Amino acid sequence: MSGIRWAEREYSDEEIYSILSEPVREWFKQKFGTFTPPQRYAVLEIHRGENVLISSPTGSGKTLSAFLSAINELILLGEEGKLEDKIYVLYVSPLRALNNDIKRNLEGPLAEIKKVAKELGYELPDIRVGIRTSDTSSYEKSKMVKKPPHILITTPESLAIALNAPKFSERLKTVKYVIIDEVHALAENKRGSHLALSVERLQEMADNEFVRIGLSATIHPLEEVTKFVFGFNDDGTPRPGLIVDVSFAKQTEIKVESVVEDLIYTDAGTLSDALYNRLAELIREHRTTLIFTNTRSGAERVAFNLKKRFPEFEGLIEAHHSSLSREVRLDVEEKLKRGELKAVVTSTSLELGIDIGTIDLVVLIGSPKSVNRALQRIGRAGHRLHDVSKGVILALDRDDLVEVTVLAHNARNRRLDRIRIPKNPLDVLVQHIVGMALYKVWEVEEAYRLVRRAYPFHELPFEDFMSVLKYLSGGYEGLEDRKVYAKIWLEDGKFGRRGKMTRAIYYMNVGTIPDEAKIRVYTMDKQMIGTVEEEFAERLMPGDIFVLAGRTYEFVKSRGNKIYVVPREGAKPTIPAWFSEMLPLSFDLALDVQRFRREVKGILNRRDAIRRLMRKYGIDERAAKAIIAYFREQERYSTVPDDETVLVEEVEKENTYEYFFHTLIGRRANDALSRAFAYAVSRWKGVNVGIALNDNGFLLRVPKEARLSEAEVKELFQLEDLREILKRALDNTELLKRRFRHVANRGFLILRRYVGRKKRLGRQQVIAVSLLKVLKEHYPDFPLLKEVYREIMEDKMDVENAELFLSWVRGGKIKVVFERNELPSPFAFNLEAIGSSDVVLMEDRREMIKALHRKIMALIGKNAT
């Protein structure tokens, strides 16, 4: 039996009990009575030594599925007096908070099993559980070397350090089970790539093949994720194992509601009242409610408003998000667990598996932008397996309403979005090569084989591997003058560590999460105005206008972590303030929304259109009416863009032309497309091009003299080498400069910490910009330069799907329709609002859309007569 298989056999309670030792069996019977679906599929297989990936909802007993076989084995060894002082089980989770949960959740059962054993007449030795994270004191760590825990709990970063801890790494060689939790939160980012390499390095050191167990919430495609957890053999085949997919063991009930009858003309005040009244109703009807907003600021606002408007909730509602201190977050989690709160409002911080007790209802305000995320969030409701997970999604505008209608339909029908695992992140590879060199002297070929066993590096070209070795061994001349010194030696097909300081560099700089900076904003005469988030600064290009502290400023330049601006009273902002926190729509869901548009277009003129939508998509009448009205307006004024048609509208303004591209492919792919198109237009016309974008499309703004013809617009869709154009478009952008610092940090090119000293972020940024210049000029193939472009284009943006979309247009699968319109069409209202006034307040945005709508309706009326 080889390869990856789907688990098909559900074992009976008796079969599972037959492998459990008497104390474990008795304890389980007393405590649970019967096994849950993940346990029925997985426990026996893990016992037999199979690698297993379990995908199942919160509260389905998947953590115990992972630990039960291991605990059973430790108890059996204890009964036979063979339990040694060594690490048998390694548990890795991305959340430090989860680690404390797990320790508690293990120590309880272990004590109970010991008690049951005593009643049965056994004397069992203690099974020790230990945690090793950045919070663990050196005293604790040295105790662990002398007397290691049988079960070790850690984070990806601490594992990478432990692999190189001279004495402790010896203790890791005995591991028999490696459990990776929250796989869905790791696979898509560099922390996951980092962990995948650590696990392969651990396997290389280990005395035997260990069993790999991955635990994940709803995720797709499971075959990919399984390869990510299990890795590959030397011959390039995936390591064998089982996929246990019980992600739909729990029933979900998802309702979509429009908060008001009319999403256009209802003023902001009335809309707010309706939203908070509905939330209050839902909170009153349930024991505990978890409310998700899509931004941290949104979570604060909703919690504040609920408390202010409804005094009955005072002390019963709290906010929980990643900008709050750890103490505050823990306090909220504890209160929730003890049932002292009626509701918690959160952004993304409670999506993951922190144990928060029983939730009766999950409310999502606005679209969560992906089916997987919706199911993860709603899955927090009904903590026990037979409970139904109840979710309500409240839509606040028409685009949102269309999106969540399709999203909820996909969630009910289990149409999940595909995740994307980063491919060959070279900055992560740099860290591990240094770590490996600290461990021993390697044959180049042998090290390359090890690296390719990890899924993210499975297709790593040999020349990329060699370029990393060349950089680390000082092969790029001229870098030493810039204080970049060799960390390994490389000769005769072998490499090893170089210099005494390499170990300290590795320990102090390992990890993938960048230090995020607050960027200070100054006027040209050095007056400080305030700060912006680094993610916001990434978007700026010279000439961009944004709002800070209620006034408008034009971005001029940056130096280190300062940016310089000139006041521009009354100028129209080009970048909205809430941009950096928005979640992007997944590409798969975007395509389904396109199909939905075509489907609605097909029934617009039928008398039963509203009924049909209600029946098929499970939405209320109010929502169905709003969707049909929205589509009718679009069709009467313009064209409905869908999966066979891209609409581009030209709208003339006072001194500019605006081009609305209705490319519904998600914000990440639109980011790539819009930058490439804007770059092409600026090269053709010799002008600056303004960009605004969202999930449904983007807007390009050009001066009057640079008007585009229909032929030129259509030519943009014929662009052949999107990546090359995008690469040129990224030149000199803040995005490239800031991301290069992150990549240079991860790739040990710019050290964050050295010999106990921390380098100031501003200083690091200055060094990054000057290094970037040197590398682009002299070493265009430098590995970390290659990586920064890959990270921006593939991880931050979605260049692959943007290319795919263009190929559909070029191949004739999608046709481009060009129109000259007096006003932007209804489907373009949101883009127009984002692009034309930094609507600091949602109120202004609504007012603007309302005014546009009145004008459009008047035009439609006029044309109809």
Image: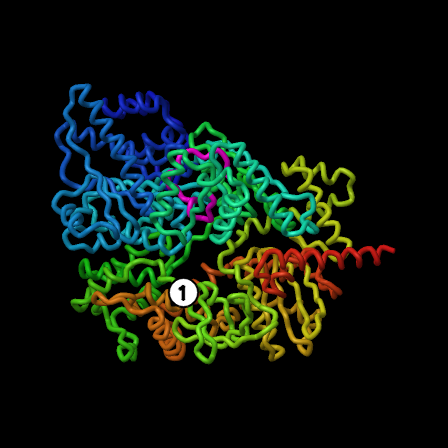
Residue plotted at (41% across, 33% down): 339
* Residue 15 percent across, percent down from the top left: 32, 23
Which secondary structure lies at badge 1? Answer: strand
**Quadrant including the C terminus:** bottom right
| Residue 124, quarter of picture | top left
Residue plotted at (41% across, 46% down): 184
Q: Residue furthest right?
A: 865
Magenta portion: prevailing SS class: loop
| Residue 849, quarter of picture | bottom right
| Residue 30, quarter of picture | top left
165 or 487, which lies in front?
165
Task: Return the residue at label 1.
Answer: 518
* Residue 706 percent across, percent down from the top left: 66, 77
- Which contiguous range is marked in magenta? 345-362
* Residue 489 percent across, percent down from the top left: 21, 69
Residue plotted at (30% across, 24% down): 28
114 on left or right of 567: left
Residue plotted at (68% across, 71% down): 657
Check if residue 285 falls in the magenta segment. no
Check if residue 355 falls in the magenta segment. yes
214 on left or right of 154: right
480 or 268, which lies in front?
268
261 on left or right of 284: right
* Residue 29 percent across, percent down from the top left: 31, 21
